[in-house]
């Protein structure tokens, strides 16, 4: 199977990016590499998303070590990696992160034959929209309840409880945005 390095867009550091991609594919079993130049993401470094072949979890530490070394060699680049199976499973479940970011226009390297339909599992949009609507309705009811609680405590001049309720209102707004942007939410605080 033939690997392909696509022509890179006109970048300020084309040699650096080409060198990093070359080093990556020699040291990690990469299926695809997506590139986001600094101006596209409002940052000061290049951001790469690697889609690696499914590998045993015992290789994760080795992959992280390789990426850490490359991060020292290429300080203006940051890299995230995902297993192919993970990407396909999450998109099948309706997580839009990869659908939004792993687009053909951001692809700079692929191994094997490139087929757009192969990467992502088919998605039932009606099921996805029903899940999104259910998440939104649940979050909206929580936001409304906390906001009403804050108003109640303000009326009774219990400012500590009102502040807590406003804090919870904002937290629920962030959770709603997380569900909207990535289809899921982080379970920590």
Image (tube, rainbow, N blue to C red):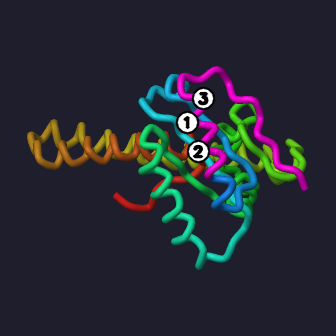
Asked which quadrant contains residue 25, the reply is bottom right
Cβ–Cβ under 8 Å for marks 2 and 3: no
Q: Over which residues does the magenta segment extend?
A: 1-23
Relative to 35, does residue 9 appear above or below in the rendering? above
Q: Disc 3 and disc 1: Cα gap in Å? A: 5 Å
Cβ–Cβ under 8 Å for marks 1 and 2: yes
Q: Secondary structure at mark 2?
A: helix
Which residue appears at 54% of the width and 22% of the height? Answer: 12
Asked which quadrant contains residue 156, the reply is top left
Residue 16's tag is 1
At which x and y percent is residue 90?
A: 68, 57
At which x and y percent is residue 20?
A: 58, 44
Q: Which residue is mark 3?
A: 14
Cβ–Cβ under 8 Å for marks 3 and 1: yes
Q: Is residue 22 magenta?
A: yes
Left/right of residue 166 with respect to residue 48 in the rendered view: left
Q: How many marks?
A: 3
Q: Is residue 122 visible?
A: no
Residue 20's tag is 2
Which residue appears at 67% of the width and 24% of the height? Answer: 9
Q: Secondary structure at mark 1?
A: helix
């Amino acid at each position: 199977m033939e690997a392909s390095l696509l022509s890179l867009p006109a970048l300020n550091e084309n040699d650096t990016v080409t060198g990093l991609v070359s080093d990556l594919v020699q040291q990690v079993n990469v299926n695809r590499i997506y590139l986001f130049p600094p101006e596209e993401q409002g940052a000061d470094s290049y951001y790469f998303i690697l889609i690696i072949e499914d590998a045993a979890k015992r290789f994760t530490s080795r992959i992280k070590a390789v990426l850490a070394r490359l991060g020292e060699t290429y300080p203006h680049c940051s890299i995230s990696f995902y297993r192919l199976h993970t990407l396909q499973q999450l998109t099948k479940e309706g997580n839009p992160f990869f659908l939004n970011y792993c687009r053909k226009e951001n692809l700079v390297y692929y191994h094997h034959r490139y087929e757009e339909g192969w990467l992502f599992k088919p998605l039932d949009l009606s099921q996805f929209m029903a899940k999104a609507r259910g998440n939104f309705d649940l979050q909206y009811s929580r936001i409304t309840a906390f906001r009403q609680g804050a108003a109640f405590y303000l009326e009774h001049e219990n400012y500590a409880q009102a502040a807590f309720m406003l804090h919870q209102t904002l937290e629920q707004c962030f959770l709603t945005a997380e569900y909207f942007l990535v289809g899921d939410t982080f379970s920590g605080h």
